[in-house]
Image (cartoon, grey):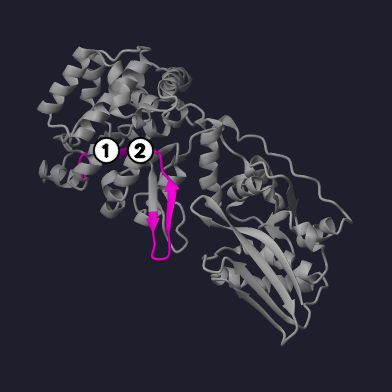
């Protein structure tokens, strides 16, 4: 009887949980069994491994082969178990030295021709290997991804034949090199292309400065989507730790292309037919949703009232806490979800409420019904609400070119730098996350008095009052002021509405 052990990983959210693949070859009736709470994809790996070894000219011994995935009570899912099972079997058969495998973890999917296909989760697996002083065996196309995480050694193999030769010492594989950071082209279109709409561009700048949630209301063609598409170009680069957080989620979702960790904040714009599971995460494998894929970036929801109401209501808790909990009967999985929500909507279903020439015959009731699709608690979490009115063609053709994204981004970057310095040690980096206690000292007495009086007259909730103070703090940061004055609070209050305007 021979026994070999290979380490691999299962995933709980973005956390890599070590799994020991134990392969035993013993006397008995010929059989190949996989146990350890494996799902169908893992169970089918025995057929892929059998076919690949046969293609290499290696026949399985006529004995009882048992593969145990320990711990046995942890659910295992995914095709990345193919490679560790194959390596464990090869070690148990004496093809490769078992003591070499003790210093490595492995993950990869086997194609029938023996090539090793890319899998999700290499980045968190490599991080876990670095903590355990293990090397990582992974597909050749993901070697750069493994290098970013600092594993003690990364072996990126194109196929199983090359990997066998490497462990036998006949032909060593070259160590993979880290990929260069993703290009800066993701900054998107320039803000100068938006003619007019000065008040809307001001709101966009404030939202970018403090990472505030923004809702734009206006008729079709008024420029709401154009403005939203230009928001990423105003945002500063992510810090190295933030970029790693974003890349961990993308790696688990299988979307980290070329192993490149981009310094740019993500921008996600799902269609309004997206389900609750698509937005917040879920499905049979509890995969991350759009709100997690937009972590540290922008989640743009166009045609906001057209999204299913349960999906919108499911966003309320993540927008407040910065994390989303995907609850299933078998497990509870948590994903990061610190996003900046930007939403756009028409004032009514026809879109022309308030335009006597084009509004439908049920106005203004159609606007009230349409806007009632958005609950008060959801709207209360939005920091800035603005009306975006269309620009007449004559004025649009003659409107001067405005500031470029680079010019506005410079002010936003200075404001973000002031916020990082202010909240250093609190574990936060933007005004949108700041507690009231951390901001009150920076408010002039008359500015705070105005905010309190306005909150009473506008019947703002405690959340609405706090978010108004945060927006005022961002306006002061854009102006380079250390103290929030009365005009900063007054401007912040103009963006605070309990319901979108009816046109």
| Stretch of the chain drawn in magenta | 326-351
Instruction: Point out the image quarter for the N terminus.
Output: bottom right
Q: Quadrant of residue 429?
A: top left
Mark 2 neighbour density, 10 Å: few (under 14) some (14–19) many (20 or more): many
Q: Nearer the viewer, residue 83 or 217?
A: 83
Asked where in the image residue 286 lies, by quadrant, the reply is: bottom left
Can residue 69 be found in the magenta stretch?
A: no
Vertical position of residue 245 compared to residue 455: above or below: below
Task: Give the residue drawn at x 15%, y 34%.
Answer: 354
Helix, strand or loop for disc 1: loop
Disc 1 residue crowd, few under 14, some 14–19, many 20+, Cα 10 Å: some
Q: Is residue 78 left or right of residue 460?
A: right
In primary-sequence order, the first of circles 1 and 2 is 2
What residue is disc 1 on? 381
Q: Residue furthest bottom?
A: 29
In the image, is residue 347 part of the stretch drawn in magenta? yes
Instruction: Compute the Cα span from label 1 to label 2.
Output: 10 Å
Rendered location of residue 489, percent (x, y): 23, 19
Secondary structure under the numbered disc 2 in the rendered image: strand
* 206 on left or right of 87: left
Question: Eyeballing the image, is 408 above or below 256?
Answer: above
Residue at (19, 46) in percent of width and height = 370
Q: Where is residue 331 shown, x and y percent of the image?
A: 43, 61
> Outermost residue, right direction?
170
Q: Tell me the mark number nearer the camera, choosing from 1 and 2.
A: 1
**Circle 2 sits on which residue?**
341
Residue 305 visible (yes or no): yes
């Amino acid at each position: 009887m021979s026994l070999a052990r290979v380490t691999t990983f299962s995933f709980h959210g973005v956390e890599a949980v070590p799994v020991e693949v134990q392969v035993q070859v013993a006397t008995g009736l010929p059989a190949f069994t996989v146990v350890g709470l494996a799902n169908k994809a893992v169970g089918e790996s025995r057929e892929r491994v059998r076919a690949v070894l046969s293609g290499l000219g290696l026949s399985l011994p006529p004995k009882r082969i048992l593969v145990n995935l320990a711990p046995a009570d942890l659910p295992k899912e995914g095709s990345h178990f193919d490679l560790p099972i194959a390596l464990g079997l090869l070690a148990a058969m004496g093809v490769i030295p078992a003591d070499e495998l003790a210093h490595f973890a492995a993950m990869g999917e086997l194609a029938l021709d023996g090539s090793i296909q890319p899998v999700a989760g290499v980045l968190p697996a490599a991080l876990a290997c670095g903590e355990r002083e293990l090397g990582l065996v992974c597909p050749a196309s993901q070697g750069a991804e493994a290098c970013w995480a600092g594993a003690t050694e990364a072996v990126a193999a194109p196929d199983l034949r090359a990997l066998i030769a490497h462990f036998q010492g006949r032909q060593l594989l070259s160590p993979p090199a880290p990929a260069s950071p993703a290009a800066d082209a993701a900054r998107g279109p320039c803000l100068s292309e938006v003619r007019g709409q000065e008040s809307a561009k001001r709101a966009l700048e404030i939202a970018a400065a403090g990472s505030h949630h923004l809702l734009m209301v206006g008729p079709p063609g008024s420029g709401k989507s154009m403005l939203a598409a230009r928001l990423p170009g105003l945002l500063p680069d992510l810090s190295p730790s933030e970029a790693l957080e974003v890349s961990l989620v993308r790696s688990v979702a299988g979307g980290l292309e070329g192993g490149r960790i981009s310094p740019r904040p993500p921008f996600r714009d799902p269609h309004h037919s997206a389900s609750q599971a698509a937005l917040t995460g879920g499905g049979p494998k509890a995969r991350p949703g759009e709100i997690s894929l937009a972590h540290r970036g922008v989640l743009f929801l166009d045609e906001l009232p057209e999204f299913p109401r349960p999906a919108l209501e499911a966003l309320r808790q993540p927008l407040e806490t910065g994390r989303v909990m995907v609850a299933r009967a078998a497990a509870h999985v948590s994903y990061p979800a610190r996003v900046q929500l930007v939403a756009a909507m028409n004032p009514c279903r026809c879109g022309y409420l308030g335009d006597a020439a084009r509004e439908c015959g049920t106005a203004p009731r159609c606007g009230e019904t349409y806007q009632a699709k958005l609950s008060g608690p959801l709207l209360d979490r939005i920091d800035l609400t603005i009306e975006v009115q269309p620009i007449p063609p004559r004025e649009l053709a003659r409107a001067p070119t405005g500031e470029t994204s680079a010019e506005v981004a410079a002010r936003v970057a200075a404001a973000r730098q002031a916020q990082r310095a202010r909240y250093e040690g609190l574990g936060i980096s933007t005004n949108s996350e700041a507690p009231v206690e951390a901001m009150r000292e920076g408010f002039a007495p008359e500015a705070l008095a105005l905010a309190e009086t306005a909150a009473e007259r506008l019947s703002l909730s405690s959340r609405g009052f706090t978010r108004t103070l945060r927006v005022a703090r961002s306006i002061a940061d854009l102006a380079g002021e250390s103290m929030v004055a009365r005009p900063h609070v007054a401007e912040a209050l103009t963006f605070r509405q309990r319901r979108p305007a009816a046109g």
